[in-house]
Image (cartoon, helix red, strand yellow):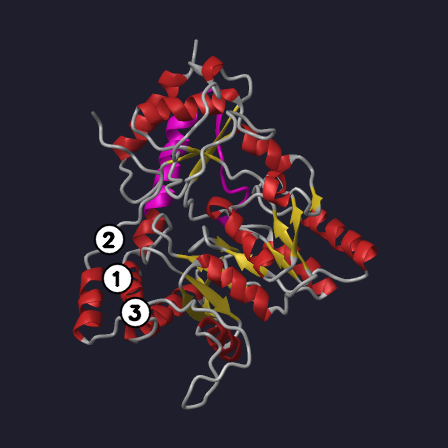
Amino acid sequence: MRERIYLCLAHMSGREQDFIKEAFDSNWVVPMGPNVNGFEKDLEEFVNKVDDNGRIKELDRKVCCLSAGTAAVHLALLACGVGPGDEVLVQSFTFCASSHPITYLGATPVFVDSERETWNMDPDLLEKAIKDRIAKTGRKPKAIIPVALYGMPYQIDRILEIAERYEIPVIEDAAEGLGSRFDGQVLGTFGEYGVLSFNGNKMITTSGGGALVCRDEEAKKEVLFYATQARESYPYYQHEHIGYNYRMSNICAGIGRGQMTVIDEHIAHHKHVQALYRELLANVKGVTLHENPTPRFDSNFWLCAVTLDPALKVKGQENAYKKVITGAVGGAAGVTHAASSATTDCQPNANVEAMRVALDAANIEARPLWKPMHKQPVYNEAPAYVNGVSESLFAVGLCLPAGPYVTDEDVRYIVDSIKNAIGN
């Protein structure tokens, strides 16, 4: 039996153990230390380089390493003054970590649908939502959160122009887009804050962790204050604000420092895998690969995504959604609740589910696209500005393996398995 091919697992470089050993030898095993400082400097060097058609320019963004990308979203919202009763505009087509922190602060997510080219936040709908929320509530939303879905850059030029006109700060959720660029500039460095993630399946990993890209040193200091329990500068514990235990550990940061030595290799490999999918799927009727819309967009292709034509026949699709799933599926290791029914009111088409099942039987991990947040039961009362794009993509989309462990042979095997699953 062929070994299982996973969607995306970060690859270790060998340097990680050196940094971890150094942390243990020096007894720095707490949420601070030399590795944390070093990892932040490495990240700053990486995100601040702008490739302007071969001319390298330098930004001066600062990076604060945290325990998770979700923590970074939370602290960015806090830094933007979000609190109870406020509203935050957030992309609907995303993972829940983009919107859940809004609710942590007692605020309300206002979901904005996607445009078809990048699959990310639709600038036209964004402006419509801003005008409508002002008309309905008498107040502007407190922040805007676009998301780099599967690494694809958002239309940040248009989003920033709208945000600046209405004086609303932008928090870039670039958790999936580390190393992706728009006009040569790294995502996460355009807005007031930029969110990065180093979860085990991201472009680089610290096993679990994240970071917040800040405009300047003062903004970073404020974030760090809240990330370390908001302790005041007394010789005893004095707290005048509510803080959080969100600082990254020196051990995890050691892994991150090792990973930074291979980040360019990882990004290059993901792009290579995308190019191979492009070549091998070119003549597979009914299967379309998601691509950069223009040269201004430079995705890291964290995951390679395809859409299946609704008319495409996949073997076994007549049996899709016949059984209630009772365990974890597609990396959902934390699932402990059995599904209450085999279907919901918003789900992938039967041929997409049949393809997922066929690939799973071939030991290939594939997953549906993110289910839009405005269709999640937990957000059924949240305002949403929709155009049908994210729902239509969710119905036809599938993510294919793209990580550093995915070889050319694996990609050929995956594409052959896709072809074999298509009915005559």
Mark 2 lies on a secondary structure that is loop
Q: Is residue 325 visible?
A: yes
State the residue at coordinates (68%, 61%). 163
Alpha carbon distance from label 3 to label 1: 13 Å
Amino acid carrying label 1: it is Gly
Residue on which the image places disc 3? 250
Numbered mark located on residue 210 in the image: none
Mark closest to the chain's N terminus, 2 or 1: 2
Q: Position of residue 250 (x, y in %)?
A: 30, 69
Q: Position of residue 168 (x, y in %)?
A: 68, 64
Numbered mark located on residue 12 in the image: 2
Q: Vertical placement of 303 versus 231: above or below?
A: above
Q: Position of residue 105 (x, y in %)?
A: 60, 62
Circle 3 residues within 10 Å: few <14, some 14–19, many ≥20: many
Circle 2 residues within 10 Å: few <14, some 14–19, many ≥20: some
Residue on which the image places disc 1? 258
The residue range painted magenta reads 269-298
State the residue at coordinates (51%, 42%). 292
In this view, the residue in front, 415 or 396, is: 396
Q: Vertical placement of 147 versus 76: above or below?
A: above
Closer mark to the observer between disc 3 and disc 1: 3
Alpha carbon distance from label 2 to label 1: 8 Å
* Number of numbered discs visible in the structure rendering: 3
Q: Relative to residue 238, is residue 418 drawn left or right?
A: left
